[in-house]
Amino acid sequence: MNILVTGGAGYIGTHTCVALLEAGNSVIVADNLCNSTAESIEKVKQITNKELTFYQMDVTDAEKVEAIFSKHKIDGVIHFAGLKAVGESVVKPLTYYYNNIISTMILTKYCQKYGVNRFVFSSSATVYGDNTVPFIETMDLLPTTNPYGETKAMSERILTDIAKANPEFSVAILRYFNPVGAHESGLIGEAPNGIPNNLMPYVSQVAKGKFEKLRVFGNDYPTIDGTGVRDYIHVLDLAEGHVAALDHLKNGVHVYNLGTGQGTSVLELVKAFEEANGIDIPYEIVERRPGDIASCYADASKANRELGWTARRDIIAMCRDAWRFEKNYKDLVESK
């Protein structure tokens, strides 16, 4: 199949491009590079020894989006493109609502115009709000605690309504949890601009000496050690989940959690990183971060049952692979 991947130069996008290419698909990437680099596309080509088509563009630009649909015979879309920092979304809600929702609307508009009926949407466990764990797909969605989560919930509703109005339109909504790790080659991984919003790259950069210590946001949650609990999933498992969803897509809307089903606290992840890599991670406890909840982990049995997918890599592998990429990253940048 010929697959358009929006946000395909980003962290999850690049790993999914690798998985798509290795599965025999052709890939077209659209990315504005606001939190990624064009070099990551070259690394995907290096890993797979295959070519792909890349457009540097914003998918809120309707004219440029239609140009892609008119030029290429697209069989399906995987939509990653969007802003994703929970804390930033609280400070810049309008930016998040505009970017994340408009992009979904524009893409689906041209899917309908050009007869593209396979759509995989990158959603998030944040749509569950502060619900009872483990989160399961049949739960009523609660009002989320941040604008980022609201943009995902709204996009889900838009896609659901479009599918109801167009019976041939097939949608897989993938609610995934906390992606970490990197490709085993060490060539691609999570490399955010500025101070990381996500835990694993923050830990990795402390290990590398870029930051003096890790800031842990709160230790008074009702969890095993007072720190926030999340379901960390290896990015390669997550990428494989997208390919499985695309391959098994049927008419209608299908919602899947992509997670391990195992909750890990911040301090448990720090200890796992230390164990996997033999490095001490200094940290300090600071105030809670706006928009965070205490616990978030998946019931991922539906994805296993319907897609034949399950997360296979453990937390030690996630920490080891993340550190391998972080160690290589300066050399990768300087070799440009």
Image: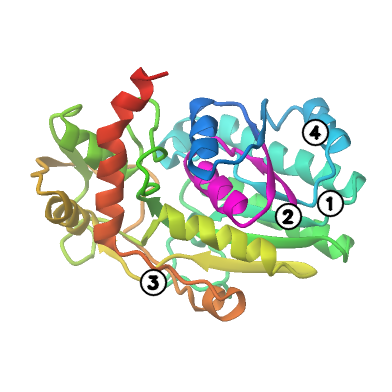
Q: CA distance from mark 3 to mark 2?
A: 25 Å
For the N terminus, the quadrant is bottom right
Q: Nearer the viewer, residue 12 or 167?
A: 12
Q: Which residue is mark 3?
A: 261
Which residue does the image show at 44% across and 55% down from the upper left?
236
Please tell me how crowded label 3 is: few (under 14), some (14-19), or many (20+) other residues with Cα within 10 Å.
many
Q: Earlier in the sequence, mark 1 or mark 3?
A: 1
Which residue does the image show at 14% across and 55% down from the upper left?
271
Amino acid type, mark 4 = Ile
Q: Nearer the viewer, residue 230 or 17?
A: 17
Residue 68: mark: 4
Amino acid type, mark 1 = Val
Which residue does the image show at 85% across and 44% down from the upper left?
73
Tag 1 and tag 2, C-beta contact below 8 Å: yes
Amino acid type, mark 2 = Phe
Which residue does the image show at 10% across and 44% down from the upper left?
279
Tag 1 and tag 3, C-beta contact below 8 Å: no
Q: Secondary structure at mark 2?
A: strand
Give yes or no for residue 286 being in the magenta stretch.
no
Q: Which residue is mark 2?
A: 119
Tag 3 and tag 2, C-beta contact below 8 Å: no
Q: CA distance from mark 4 to mark 3?
A: 38 Å
Where does residue 199 sit, x and y in percent of width and height? Answer: 29, 45
* Span shown in magenta: 1-29
For the C terminus, the quadrant is top left
Residue 116: mark: 1
Q: Secondary structure at mark 4?
A: helix
Q: Is residue 119 left or right of residue 236?
A: right
Q: Secondary structure at mark 3?
A: loop
Where does residue 108 sit, x and y in percent of width and height? Answer: 79, 46
Tag 4 and tag 1, C-beta contact below 8 Å: no
Where does residue 297 sit, x and y in percent of width and height? Answer: 39, 66
